[in-house]
Amino acid sequence: MAHTRRGFLKLAGAATVAAAAVPHGGGAAQTPAPGKRSGNGGQMPKGLTLCTLRSGDRFTLGVRTKKGVLDVEKAAKALRKTSPTTMDDLLQGGDGKALQALVEAATANGNAKGAFVAEERAPFGPCVTNPEKIIMLGFNYKKHVEEVKTKMPTSPVFFNKYNNALNHHGGVINLPQKVGSKFDYEVELVVVMGKTARDVSEADALSYVFGYATGNDFTARDLQFKTSQYVLGKSCDGFAPLGPWLVTADQIPDPQTLKLECSVNGEVRQSANTNDMIFSVANIVSYASQHFTLKPGDIFFTGTPSGVIYGMPPEKQVWLKPGDKVACSIDKCGELRFSLAGSQA
């Protein structure tokens, strides 16, 4: 999978065009104009565990069911029903009720049998493919702050990644060994915005969230601290694995009670709970919205807990290398797995 912004936008654009071409019982799919991020015009879906599927050079929307992963585009064609058929289409105003109706019909109708794929064979893409903003948080777990011996922050510490960093469940990170060598893992709860938010209160903030996912803020520590800005160490190609699932927000009413873990080659390295966060998800969303407009599909990586290699004593710091396999899991969000390979790029 090519990790370039141009590639992702091309893929997302192609998927949107294809979605518009799907038969919808006589009507064309209604998608926002290019560049428009209007938010979920209808009701956001509830009770669904979503994903992105790679279909050739395109991305399509998937839904986890007891029958397997439903390819929504194939189901819409088979049943001739209206539904958003890409994740971006859904986030940018797609009808959540129509999607739920399609899922119900597909699981009950034998005509959609060919639209299901077994989870172990599903070709996952990043569960969000085209965010306008990827907002990262540093130093947001108390024990992590303590292990790296830095000051406790008094407000959220934001930095960013870019779309070229997006990666998927089962993906590979090609380590840029020509420029870096100190590669580190960071399991993180990812928050996906569902509605445009500007200057929202902390009490209302969670109502703007579409859902939650498992992510990893993969990092090259030597590049991160090469300058006072973190971008070099954070935004290399593939450094933001995300997925496989995007769980709708109604299934996680309190994101501050989730266990999260990260393991390397089967050895647990991080094990914590989101109740150790310094700034809650509601606080993060509210605080960010006071400074800039949040758009549907924007994502927050909400910080990593203790247990990173960087937080260990120097003599115990054994950095990640090609061949290593990383697994990250968060309650209700599922397990994200990826592997590392060598690269001189």
Image (cartoon, rainbow, N blue to C red):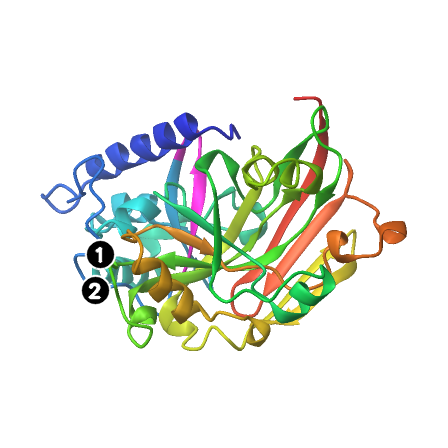
Residue 312 vertical position relative to residue 74 in the rendered view, above or below: below
Q: Position of residue 131 (x, y in %)?
A: 37, 44
**Crowd class of label 1 (few under 14; some 14 to 19; many from 20; radius 10 Å):** many
Q: Nearer the viewer, residue 124 or 128?
A: 128
Label 2, secondary structure: give it: loop
Q: Residue under label 2, please give it.
A: 43
What amino acid does circle 2 point to?
Gln
| Rendering quarter of residue 179 | top right
Q: Position of residue 268 (x, y in %)?
A: 76, 62
In the rendered view, does 220 fall on the left or right side of 10? right
Q: Residue under label 1, please give it.
A: 40
Question: Which of the image's four quarters has the C terminus?
Answer: top right
Q: Residue furthest left?
A: 26
Magenta region, main secondary structure: strand
Query: Tags 2 and 1 in contact by the CB under 8 Å rule?
Result: yes
* Residue 106 visible to an observer of this rendering: no
In the rendered view, does 274 fall on the left or right side of 100? right
**Crowd class of label 2 (few under 14; some 14 to 19; many from 20; radius 10 Å):** few
For residue 83: magenta?
no
What residue do we see at 30% from left, 32% from top?
Answer: 13
What amino acid does circle 1 point to?
Asn
Residue 123 vertical position relative to residue 268 in the rendered view, above or below: above
Q: Residue furthest right?
A: 315
Q: Position of residue 217 (x, y in %)?
A: 58, 49
Report the span colored magenta: 49-58
In the rendered view, does 344 fall on the left or right side of 267? left
* Residue 330 visible to an observer of this rendering: yes
